[in-house]
Image (cartoon, rainbow, N blue to C red):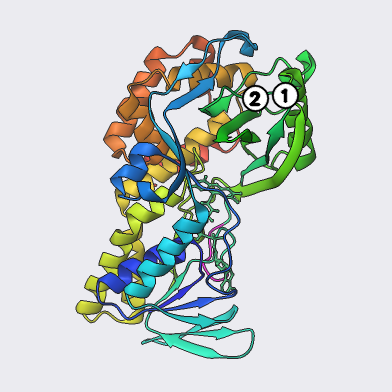
Amino acid sequence: MLVIGAGPAALAIATELGRRGVSVEALSATEPEAPWVNTYGIWGEEVDALGLAHLLAHRWSDTVSYFGAGGEQGSEPTLHGRDYGLFDKVALQRYGLETCTAAGLRWRRGTAAHLGHNPTESTVTTRDGEAIKAKLVIDATGHEPVFVRRPADGPIAGQAAYGIVGRFAAPPIAPGQFVFMDFRADHLEEEERRSQPPTFLYAMDLGDGLFFVEETSLALAPPVPFPVLKDRLHRRLAHRGAPVLEVQHEEFCLFPMNPPLPDLSQRVVGFGGAASMVHPASGYLVGGLLRRAPDLAAAVGSGLAAGLSGEALARAAWQGLWPAERRWNHAFFRFGLEKLMRFDEARLRHHFATFFSLPPEQWYGFLTNTLTPRQLLAAMVRLYGLAPWDVRWGLMGLQGREPALLARMLAGG
Ligand SMILES: Cc1cc2nc3c(=O)[nH]c(=O)nc-3n(C[C@H](O)[C@H](O)[C@H](O)COP(=O)(O)OP(=O)(O)OC[C@H]3O[C@@H](n4cnc5c(N)ncnc54)[C@H](O)[C@@H]3O)c2cc1C
């Protein structure tokens, strides 16, 4: 088995395959120990269920959002009542490297450039001309995969965010707090709020006077440009009397939120960003790939034990990763995101205020993609019943490519 990549997806799947006794090599374009750049957040309950709470650098119990009437400065917070955590990315990477080494993974260095197949095996050739043969290749090279192909079905929306880790003239959020979504927008002109894409603040108190503040756009195609996000963040901070005093780190975050599912009949299998596993409505991936690596590994393990050919093994692997229920959820989330991208700032605030008034197991299950299709539908019916009329109207009409996405959902994803 050959896994390509050395990100969270590659380490998770290599570990699970190794634990099932599958012989695995991994091909990485960089040193596998090259530091990860992204900061990964996760809900407390999710990380607890994975048994990985010890890999968090920070954990907050005071977790809030602001969707309040008028989006004004004095509006009341929505209390989430659930912990949120930030991974210590060095510890998370070290853990991943250690577990896959313990599971027997062997590393190779090289950039995968070409892929060929014959009935029994696949051959990956690196830029340096080295040929590596494997019965199955798993492409875990991220959101722009080197080999996995997806059908084109319209523009892909990006979640864009500009963030700063730094010190401020005053605390930009309450001490000890995590702010999931602050949609207060009274620092913007009325015209901007009406006609420009809505953005919100995602922020955390990192302790010792250090805060991470990030201006974020849920998703848009084309994505909201970084200069707009940066300008809005600085205006938001100035409006709160908390301009930046010192920047320790800047984050330019951009990843695709709603890519279609890959073609599940292709001979190379994907995992992680490469397999469109990012949650199309929340942008989360890490929890999902740690939960779902055992499914893909089990399908590969059983296929190998049954002596499947390379081609049949790839089909079985894709089915293990994307069974019917997951495909339906994915189609549902894509349809939902398409709707939300049309909502203006006021309607989006009303939507989220309603969404977070759902029972916690429903909104949490939605955000982490841990609900069955039936549970997901029940949550959405409830949301519709609770929502004000502007949100209901927004949810009802079908515009742009919404009919096509709805049809895909009704066809099973
Ligand atoms: C700034 C940022 C913040 C994010 N925050 C969160 C978050 O808080 N929570 C969350 O769940 N998700 C978050 N995401 C989304 C997602 O979790 C990440 O994008 C995640 O890193 C994707 O993991 P991956 O392993 O699929 O791909 P990557 O992390 O992109 O890893 C790809 C690997 O493949 C290697 N590679 C690429 N091409 C080749 C090649 N040709 N040959 C060999 N190797 C190759 C790369 O070197 C790399 O090791 C964030 C994304 C970004 C960009």
Residues at discs 2 and 1 in contact (Cβ within 8 Å)? yes
**Helix, strand or loop status at disc 1:** loop
* Figure check: 284 above or below 92: above
The outermost residue toward the front is: 208
Left/right of residue 124 with respect to residue 171 in the rendered view:
left
Check if residue 265 falls in the magenta segment.
Answer: no
Please tell me which residue is depicted at 45% across the width and 17% down the height of the picture.
Answer: 354
Check if residue 150 falls in the magenta segment.
Answer: yes
Q: Position of residue 327 (x, y in %)?
A: 37, 49
Please tell me which residue is depicted at 36% across the width and 77% down the height of the picture.
Answer: 311
Is residue 316 visible in the rendered image? The answer is: no
The stretch of residues the image draws in magenta is: 146-151
Is residue 130 visible in the rendered image? The answer is: yes
Q: Which residue is mark 1?
A: 242
Residue type marked 1: Ala
* Figure check: 398 above or below 270: above
Q: Position of residue 268 (x, y in %)?
A: 45, 72
Residue type marked 2: Pro
Left/right of residue 149 with respect to residue 137 in the rendered view:
right
Q: Is the magenta region chiefly helix, strand or loop? A: loop
Q: Position of residue 411 (x, y in %)?
A: 37, 44
Quadrant showing the N terminus: bottom left
**Foreground residue, 67 or 100?**
100
Q: Which mark is residue 395?
A: none
How crowded is the residue under tag 1: few (<14 C-alpha within 10 Å), some, or many (20+)?
A: some
How crowded is the residue under tag 2: few (<14 C-alpha within 10 Å), some, or many (20+)?
A: some
Please tell me which residue is depicted at 64% across the width and 20% down the height of the picture.
Answer: 345
Q: Which residue is mark 2?
A: 171
* Figure check: 100 above or below 261: below
Q: Position of residue 23 (x, y in %)?
A: 32, 81
